[in-house]
Image (cartoon, rainbow, N blue to C red):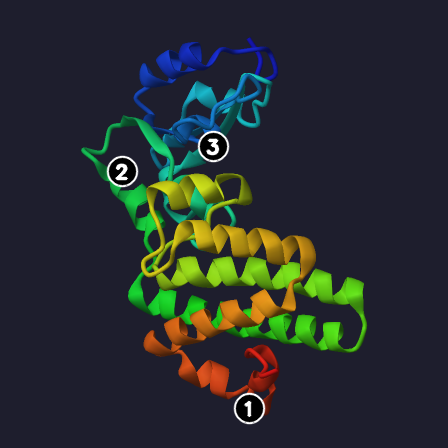
Amino acid sequence: MTAQQPLAYDAFVQLAAADSAVVGLVLKGSRAHDGMTTRHSDHDLYVVLADDVRTDLTRFAGHRTLELDLVLVSLTEFRAAGMPGFERYALARAQVVLDRLDGGIARILADKARLGADEAFEVSSGWLDAYANSLYRSVKNHRDGQALAALLDAAESVRCLLELLFALDHRPRPYNKYLEWELARHPLPGWDTDVLLRAVERISASGDVFLQRHLFTLVEATVREAGHGEVLDAWGDDLYLMRPQRG
């Protein structure tokens, strides 16, 4: 059997569990999110190998079929995966299939699911500035009759806003596919999930400037309470364009 031949998920798990070099198996993706599996869903599996240990399972490195995608990594590489990086959310919500480290694999995943206080503050500051930048450009372009630019900047501001709000709660932002799933099960403190999702959808679709400005007032109160007022104050008088306008 080669790494490219079809291989069933259950068969591989059984094979890997019998190999002492494997210290962990971690399932990510839609099959790790209850209710998100479809007939198109494959099994995305991390195979965590003990450092500096040889195994014949390396022949499956890069295995990718409609049924099974495998990522073979050393334990050291697994600890670093997504820290930071795009993979962090996937691992934050992944499921442990095998843990030979007395809960060590589960603890690694738990660490990925929560940003430390210093990290969260730094990340939040960066995304807040990016959000303000896109919001400012959107409302300015709308004012100047640049409809497409205003809409594109509005959509970009939504991306930055979601990154910001999750970072404020010390969490990696979910992929778009899992945004509603995540908020239904783990709401953002202080935010009404339905209201937030409706605002995100409407701003992304229409660039509604009134709604963008209204949303900014809520964001401003939240970030100032979290200690990020200095980031906004650096915008000076430009803040007035982001806030609701009288009349």
Q: Amino acid at mark 2?
A: Ala
* Badge 3 element: loop
Residue 78 seen in this snapshot: no
Q: Quadrant of the C terminus?
A: bottom right
Quarter of the image for residue 40 reads: top right
Q: Which residue is mark 1?
A: 236
Q: Is residue 165 above or below residue 63?
A: below
Q: Quadrant of the N terminus?
A: top right
Q: Which residue is mark 2?
A: 106
Q: Which mark is residue 63?
A: none
Assess disc 2: are there few (<14), some (14-19) or many (≥20) residues with their C-alpha within 10 Å of its C-alpha. some
Residue 69 image point, x, y percent: 53, 25
Q: Which mark is residue 29?
A: 3
Q: Amino acid at mark 1?
A: Gly
Residue 150 seen in this snapshot: yes
Q: Residue at x 58, y 51 (%)?
A: 201
Quarter of the image for residue 208 reads: bottom right
Assess disc 3: are there few (<14), some (14-19) or many (≥20) residues with their C-alpha within 10 Å of its C-alpha. many
